[in-house]
Amino acid sequence: MYPTFYHLALDLFGIDFAPFKFLQSYGMMVGLGFIAGSILLTLELKRKEAIGQIPPTKKDKKDIKGDDDDGLVHPHERVGDIAIIAGIGAIVGGKLFHNLENWDEVVADPIGALTRMSGLSFYGGMILGMVLFVWYAKKHKISILHFFDATMPALALGYGFGRLGCHVSGDGDWGIPNDSPMPEWMSFLPDWIWAYGYEGNILGVDMIQFYASKGYTSIEGLAWPTPIYEIIMSIMIFAVLWAFRKRWTVPGFMISGYFVLGGIERLLIEQIRINNEYDIMGGITQAELISVSMIILGIVGFFYMPKVGERWAKF
């Protein structure tokens, strides 16, 4: 595991540079995700402006004016603001939802639970981010529906970068124990795709003891490497959305597509992932509740948006 860039540079290149210890690998992966997402969003906003779905808006007093100013703010010029909003939503919403799901950790160490950068719920960040996006779009007279459609491919790929950070750092976002041998039909794949030990994880925990504290019995301390599976599925979801972004001309279809695919992905991974369960419906996690809700909303969107999408896109 490479909790910091120091561990990565030392292991791969033999570079012993102490300041690298301050560069967290998880934060670096999330940062790369924001950069990649910003590039994709810029391209998509330019395309949507070209086809008239998200026209430029008039500048207000706070907007910077240049020598060649045309008095307008083009959609892609707002990507910097959007990235900041997404960052606020990811941190605040992610921390809030994580703490609600792990209330025992908050009670045991309130200050630590609120200040640690580890422990961020993606769904919490996504929900708060979407609320902030609605506010921003309304403020600047941007079509909310077209705006959300434009962000979905970037969101899917950014999620994959986040899970890459989880895996590289070993932040506890792994699966339940997997001590069973790899099936023969998978023998052509590397062992770590089936089970992984997360030695040297950023939490500094022994996997066998960690599992024991969660009520599991693990002989070898190997886990299902769920972040790897989520990275693969996130790339697949991004590929589908990017391929269909020009074919799905109905406003809201990109949102619906992401909700269905993203909900199915997370619902599947929750079956082998470590998570706290609510004592309802035989035991269900927060992510499962949100995933099922997303799938339902996405399916409804595919049936309903052809009737109201064009009208709603005017708001």
Image (cartoon, rainbow, N blue to C red):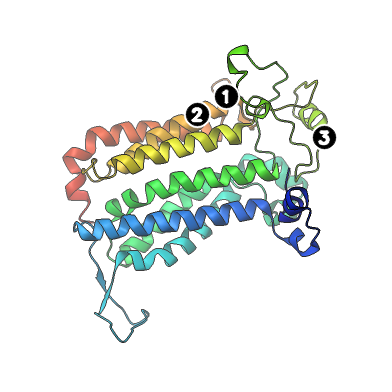
- In this rendering, the answer to whether 80 lies above or below 255 is below
Which one is closest to the eye, mark 1 or mark 3? 3
Q: Position of residue 239 (x, y in %)?
A: 39, 39
Q: Which residue is mark 1?
A: 271
Q: Give SS at disc 1.
A: helix
The spot of residue 124 in percent (x, y) is: 52, 46
Alpha carbon distance from label 2 to label 3: 27 Å
Secondary structure of the residue carrying numbered label 3: loop
Name the residue at 75% across, 24% down.
Answer: 215
The residue that appears at 70% across and 54% down in the rendered structure is 116
Question: Marks 1 and 3, Cα distance to the nearest angstrom?
Answer: 23 Å
Q: Earlier in the sequence, mark 2 or mark 3?
A: 3
Q: Which residue is mark 2?
A: 267
How packed mark 1 is, by other alpha carbons closer than 10 Å (few <14, some 14-19, many 20 or more), is few
The image shows residue 305, relative to residue 148, as above or below, that is above
In front here: 175 or 127?
175
Check whether the beta carbons of the residues at disc 2 and disc 1 lie within 8 A of each other.
Answer: yes
- Residue 218 found in image quarter: top right
Position of residue 11 in the picture relative to residue 73 (left or right) = right
The residue identified by callout 3 is 206
Q: Residues within 10 Å of mark 2 (few under 14, many from 20)?
A: some
Quadrant where the N terminus is found in the figure: top right
